[in-house]
Image: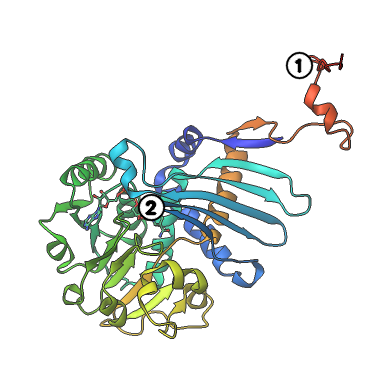
Amino acid sequence: MTTLLTPRDIGAIVGAKGLAACLGTLVSYLEADFSRWGDFDKSARVANHSADGVIELMPISDDSLYTFKYVNGHPKNTRAGLPTVMAFGVLADVDTGRPELLSELTLTTAMRTAATSVMVARQLARPDSRVMAVIGNGAQSEFQCLAFHLLMGIEEVRLFDIDAGATAKLIANLRAAAPALKATVCANTADAVRGADIVTTITADKANATIITPEMIEPGMHVNGVGGDCPGKTELHADVLRAGAVFVEYEPQSRIEGDLQQMPADFAVTEFWRVLAGQAPGRSSREQVTVFDSVGFALEDFSALRLLRDFAVELGLGRSIDLVPEMADPKNLFGALYLPATRPAPRLAVAA
Ligand SMILES: NC(=O)c1ccc[n+]([C@@H]2O[C@H](COP(=O)([O-])OP(=O)(O)OC[C@H]3O[C@@H](n4cnc5c(N)ncnc54)[C@H](O)[C@@H]3O)[C@@H](O)[C@H]2O)c1
């Protein structure tokens, strides 16, 4: 049998554990997996593009577990009452190929993306960072704000979105979830970014946008660029990348999908796992500008699915479903079509 986790189960996990503990444990699962980078069979995700969006498959495995995520990105969706990003995924046993877990990953993607941003910022941002600008106040934004508040000591978020309703929604959610976090609405991106220690961009637009321009960048800033994550979709001006040291998840994928897509093939970047492993420097001085050009990598969903599996077992959550036919004789697959208890045997038409 396969365990099914729905959004309701994810809500129950967060309800039982608390958001800070969920995000904090997720960061430790991510660090554990990024620290054994060489163990994974990695590939850039497979993307099917259409005029208004993209649908992607993200597989990865080690010796014992295989995971994949299905995820879309359709910025126009919110106008039709659908989320921009929707996802689900599977965790399977490498030994047999048996799918152990089938889970929602829409809520989980928001948590794993925020947890990944924190994992990276812990290594790259100045440790005394207290103020974060958040440009783009849609579905992912609460998760970013709360993860940085709960796990990185961010005390103030400075918010801007071209949709004032999105910012009002974010403020209302933050007031309820974290009253101690100061949230300031800003008139534009430049206002929000001025004086910030960390700049998070999490906008959705299938366009080569330049949300952050070089004159906005101040010495010592850490840029957490999350929304530029597919071909033809960027957020950072090329000179912002030139202004600092650029870190990526998995270079072959980031060259295609990240803000990095604007840069020549020999533009130097560092894969983040190397910083974690002590093989490459992170921030080199208080004044240095650091840029995390995030696109979302399959390993982050691997860590998240592993955590969901462990929490579901601990909390007794999830429903067993027969995703694969149950058979007394595994060679008698045909027999599983006509289980007597559920369906009568077929009537075979006899030619006249
Ligand atoms: N890197 C990753 O791992 C990762 C993970 C999840 C989502 N994403 C990406 O993050 C982005 C945001 O996702 P979401 O689910 O929050 O989308 P969303 O549609 O819910 O919110 C995006 C917000 O960006 C705002 N926006 C668009 N253009 C803007 C601009 N020029 N200035 C300011 N605000 C602007 C929109 O008004 C909207 O409120 C998407 O592009 C998605 O693909 C990346």
Q: Which mark is residue 123?
A: none
Colour mapping: rainbow
Secondary structure category for the residue under label 2 = loop
Report the mark closest to the observer, 2 or 1.
Answer: 2
Q: Position of residue 254 (x, y in %)?
A: 45, 70
Amino acid on which disc 2 is placed: Ala
In this rendering, the answer to whether 348 lies above or below 187 is above
Q: Quadrant of residue 5?
A: top right
Q: Quadrant of the C terminus?
A: top right
Q: Residue 143, percent across and down?
A: 35, 50
The residue beneath circle 2 is 51
Q: Secondary structure at mark 1?
A: loop
Residue furthest to the left in view is 187
Asked where in the image residue 219 lies, by quadrant, the reply is bottom left
Q: Which residue is mark 1?
A: 343
Residue 55 image point, x, y percent: 48, 51
**206 or 35, which is in the foreground?**
206
